[in-house]
Amino acid sequence: MLTIGEFARRGRVSVRMLRHYDATGLLRPARTDPTTGYRHYTADQLDLLNRVVALKDLGFTLNQVKEIVDGRVGVDRLREMLRGRRAELEAVVAEATARLARVEVRLRSIESEGHMPEHDVVVKSLPAQRVARLSAISRSYAPEDIGPVVSPLFMRLCDLLADAGISMAGPGIALYADAGGGAVTVHAAFPIGDGDGADSAGGAGLEGGAGRDGGFEVVELPAVERAAVIVHRGAMDGVVPTAQALERWVDAHGHRADGYPREVTLEAPERLADWVTELQLPLVVSPDHARSS
């Protein structure tokens, strides 16, 4: 027979853990000396110990492990338990991945602080555009809140336009407006031709109005006399450093922003790191500039 120390070494566990397993009834020693209280195990018990360790490593509680090793859990129930653990672990991984992405964004923001070349930003006018638009509310303007709202909007709008037989006349545009209480109205839009949308199922009678039954609306985006424009390369969950660089440029050059930047998707390949998006921040036009233009 093996002493508790020998059994612990062979099983790659601590003596303290074996004592705990004994106390909970999960793994009893083969013999306990009635005089000294010393525990002794057999080599055959290593199989049970290995199974306990493997189940614990999967994240099961000691009570669940005991039910399994005692044979009180059938195959169907074990399959259900494993699927539950898989779902829990997937959620943990997703949360950790999102947190890692935020850490990367913060690192990029710190590393790029104050190093934005002026030629990366240009000021230009934006023409008026007729667009088909679908809207929803995001609880905040943070990328982690915007992403889950704007992506489904664009996918839904693509489907609605296809069903209505309307062709997109330009790249997708994301627009934002305050909705109160920190929330933001998110608009997903595509430019369309002058003759499109008036008689479509998704946009019938919607010129300047709200969509019906989840349909889109057709509106005219007004022209913008002056907008500060910068190009962001990569996934939109990493857009914060680019947007902050744009805002610093606006402040440094004595301008004032007029609302949120428009986000125009210039290139959207399958690999998110290769996306190219233009941020267009409308500027407040000063009276002097208005008179001279």
Image: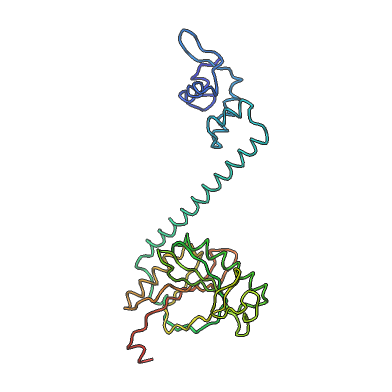
Residue furthest to the top in view is 35
At a point 56% along the width and 71% down the height, the residue shown is 134
Residue furthest to the bottom in view is 292
Classify 162 as above or below 92.
below
Classify 58 as above or below 202.
above
Residue 26 image position (x, y, % from top left)? 55, 24
At a point 40% along the width and 64% down the height, the residue shown is 181
At a point 46% along the width and 7% down the height, the residue shown is 35
Residue 241 image position (x, y, % from top left)? 41, 65
Residue 67 image position (x, y, % from top left)? 59, 28
Q: Quadrant of residue 88?
A: top right
Q: Nearer the viewer, residue 84 or 268?
A: 84
Indicate left or right for 146 with 211 as reference.
Answer: left
At a point 55% along the width and 74% down the height, the residue shown is 210
Question: Which colouring convention does the figure follow?
Answer: rainbow
Indicate left or right for 176 with 269 as reference.
Answer: left
The N terminus - image quarter? top right
Residue 235 image position (x, y, % from top left)? 51, 64
Q: Quadrant of residue 252?
A: bottom left
Q: Nearer the viewer, residue 268 or 94?
A: 94
The C terminus - image quarter? bottom left
